[in-house]
Image (cartoon, grey):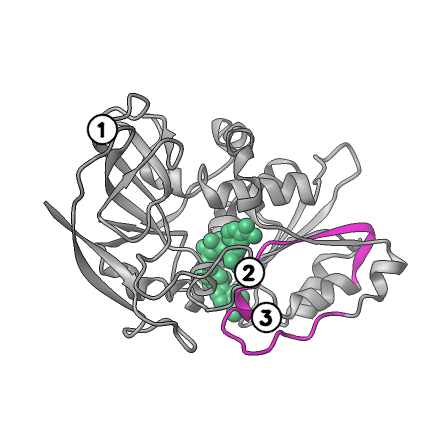
């Protein structure tokens, strides 16, 4: 029995291109005691992948080495098992890599309940949803609206896998939501379907003017997914004890030099806090974070938008859709 997997061929200089990855055929190995074989059915494509294929060893996770199967979250079903905790037919998720098949051991992959499908397990109830929940509740400590007190939150990358969950939790909690995205389709979805109060197209609108007009009472919370111009206006308009959660800076992932940051003076004047975070530090809390997201899902407060590509080969070029903005929703490859 053999299967296909995609390995890193060489680190890209800028954008990932056809010389970055290659498909190889592998022979299936026999199971050892405690192991189980998974037929992978879905892969997750994530912005962090650009960092994983850069040789920088100082990041939160070591780079993928040339010749290794590309790192990726995935979802599949156990097809053969020598582990009673993972019987044949069990749905699992975790770091599968870009492969059709994987042999894993105890605790390497998490069991997914039968009522949760692959798309949900990789999006709102998976890594992006948990990231959104952690940043919104733990880092920003957003407060549900109480009578006249209403916090104003700004969310960049608002139509994406993480951002759209943040927007929807904030709308559900009664915050005033200012969302930024980069296409008219995304602007319409955020405004009409998700209920954001103001949506700014950062590619066509004057971001500074639009943010200023939308936040007459200042800005309390900022969920930063992208980097770019909004940072400067948010920090100028941050309210006393305002909080910034730095989740992602996708605009900088291909830049040789970091973008200039806003002045820190308002961190003192307004006693504001900026905190970066990475979800992998909190994976031991996955069940608790997923329960938090489930609370919103069960009340029908979160729509799950996925963008599904077809076939393992689609992963290679598909990942660039995250950097061009061509994905509409959580980007997933169906094998
Ligand atoms: N800290 C963590 O643990 C953690 C975990 C997951 C994700 N993240 C980060 O969170 C962010 C969102 O991730 P996601 O999975 O939800 O991806 P996503 O939003 O579903 O897809 C990426 C989106 O980023 C936007 N984008 C691309 N280039 C941009 C640029 N130069 N300026 C502004 N926006 C740009 C595009 O949307 P537009 O069409 O709107 O431009 C694109 O659709 C990323 O920065 C990612 O690295 C962090």
Indicate whether 251 appears above or below 161.
Answer: below
For the residues labelled 2 and 1, the Cα–Cα distance comes to: 35 Å
Asked if disc 3 and disc 1 are in contact, CB closer than 8 Å, the reply is no
Disc number at residue 59?
2
Point out the frontmost of discs 3 and 2: 2
- Which label lies toward us, 3 or 1? 1
**Mark number for residue 205?**
3
Asked whether residue 240 is drawn in magenta, I would say yes
- Magenta segment: does it hold 176? no
**Image quarter of residue 45:** bottom left
Q: Which mark is residue 256?
A: none
> Going by the image, does 278 lie left or right of 4?
right
Which residue is at a point 46% across and 50% down the rendered structure image? 161
Q: Position of residue 325 (x, y in %)?
A: 43, 65
Q: Is residue 155 above or below residue 172?
A: below
For mark 1, what is the residue? 81
Mark 1 is surrounded, within 10 Å at the Cα level, by few (under 14), some (14 to 19) or many (20 or more) other residues, namely: many
**SS class, disc 3:** loop
The yes-or-no answer for disc 1 within 8 Å of ligand 1 is: no
- Classify 10 Å Cα crowding around label 2: few (below 14), some (14-19), many (20 and above): few
> N-terminal of the two: label 2 or label 1?
2
Residue 138 image offset from top left, x and y in percent: 67, 39
Please report the bounds of the magenta region as a residue range.
237-262
């Amino acid at each position: 029995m053999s299967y296909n997997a995609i390995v890193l061929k060489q680190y890209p200089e800028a954008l990932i291109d056809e010389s970055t990855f290659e498909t190889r055929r592998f022979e299936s190995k026999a199971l050892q005691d405690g192991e189980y074989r998974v037929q992978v059915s879905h892969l997750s494509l994530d912005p962090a992948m650009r960092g994983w294929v850069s040789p920088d060893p100082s990041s939160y996770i070591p780079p993928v080495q040339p010749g290794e199967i590309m790192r990726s979250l995935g979802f599949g079903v156990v097809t053969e098992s020598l582990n009673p905790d993972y019987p044949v037919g069990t749905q699992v998720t975790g770091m599968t890599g870009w492969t059709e098949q994987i042999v894993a051991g105890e605790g390497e992959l998490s069991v997914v309940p039968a009522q949760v499908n692959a798309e949900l397990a990789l999006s709102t109830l998976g890594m992006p949803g948990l990231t959104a929940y952690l940043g919104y509740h733990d880092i920003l400590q957003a407060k549900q609206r109480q009578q006249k007190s209403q916090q104003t939150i700004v969310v960049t990358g608002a139509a994406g896998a993480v951002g759209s969950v943040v927007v929807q939790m904030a709308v559900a909690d009664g915050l005033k939501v200012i969302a930024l995205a980069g296409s008219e389709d995304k602007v319409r979805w955020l405004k009409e379907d998700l209920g954001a109060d103001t949506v700014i197209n950062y590619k066509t609108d004057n971001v500074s003017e639009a943010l200023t007009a939308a936040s007459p009472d200042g800005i309390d919370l900022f969920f930063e997914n992208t980097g770019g111009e909004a940072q400067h206006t948010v920090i100028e308009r941050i309210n006393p004890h305002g909080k910034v959660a730095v989740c992602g800076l996708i605009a900088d992932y291909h830049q040789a030099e970091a973008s200039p940051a806003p002045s820190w003076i308002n961190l003192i004047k307004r006693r504001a806090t900026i905190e970066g975070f990475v979800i992998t530090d909190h994976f031991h809390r996955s069940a608790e974070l997923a329960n938090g997201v489930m609370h919103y899902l069960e009340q029908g407060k979160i729509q799950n938008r996925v963008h599904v590509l077809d076939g393992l080969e689609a992963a290679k070029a598909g990942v660039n859709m995250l950097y061009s903005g061509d994905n509409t929703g959580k980007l997933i490859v169906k094998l």
